[in-house]
Amino acid sequence: DNGTGDSTLNYTNNMASANYSSQANASINAIGNSNVYAADILASGKLAASCRMQAFYDPSTVTGVDSDHQSLLIHGDLA
């Protein structure tokens, strides 16, 4: 945990390099309606062993939020 809405996810098995495809998603349903957040993978935080993901309520304000649900999908070669 790097702060509100900012997480580093570590892989059990390293990727061959940082050149892999990734997609992040985050959502919450805290007040009874579906609020969809923007989720982003930081290019500077993408490594063979981990990747850094940030979730935002409003991407224009860059205010991070801790979401109820986060998912990460990666495609690439394992080391």
Image (cartoon, rainbow, N blue to C red):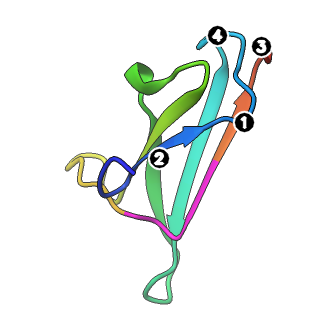
Question: Residue 69 lies in magenta, yes or no?
Answer: yes
Which of the marked residues, 3 or 2, is nearer the chain's N terminus?
2
Q: Is residue 53 left or right of residue 4?
A: right
- Which one is earlier in the sequence, the residue at label 1 or at label 3? 1
**Tag on residue 17?**
4
Q: Magenta segment range?
A: 66-71
Q: Which callout, 4 or 1, points at the residue further toward the start of the chain?
A: 1
Query: Residue at 77% across / 13% down in the picture?
Result: 79
Tell me the amino acid under the disc marked 1: Thr
The part of the image, by quadrant, that contains residue 48 is top right
In this view of the protein, which residue sits in the foreground, 65 or 1?
Answer: 1
Residue flagged by tag 2: what amino acid is it? Ala
Indicate which disc, 2 or 4, sits on the residue closer to the N terminus.
Answer: 4
Please name the residue that numbered disc 3 is placed on.
79
Amino acid at the residue labelled 4 = Ser
**Is 17 within the magenta?**
no
Q: Gap between marks 2 and 4, in whole Å? A: 22 Å
* Percent coordinates x, y for residue 16 in the rendering: 72, 11
Q: Disc 4 versus disc 1: distance between alpha carbons?
A: 14 Å
Return the residue at label 2. 39
Q: Secondary structure at mark 4?
A: loop
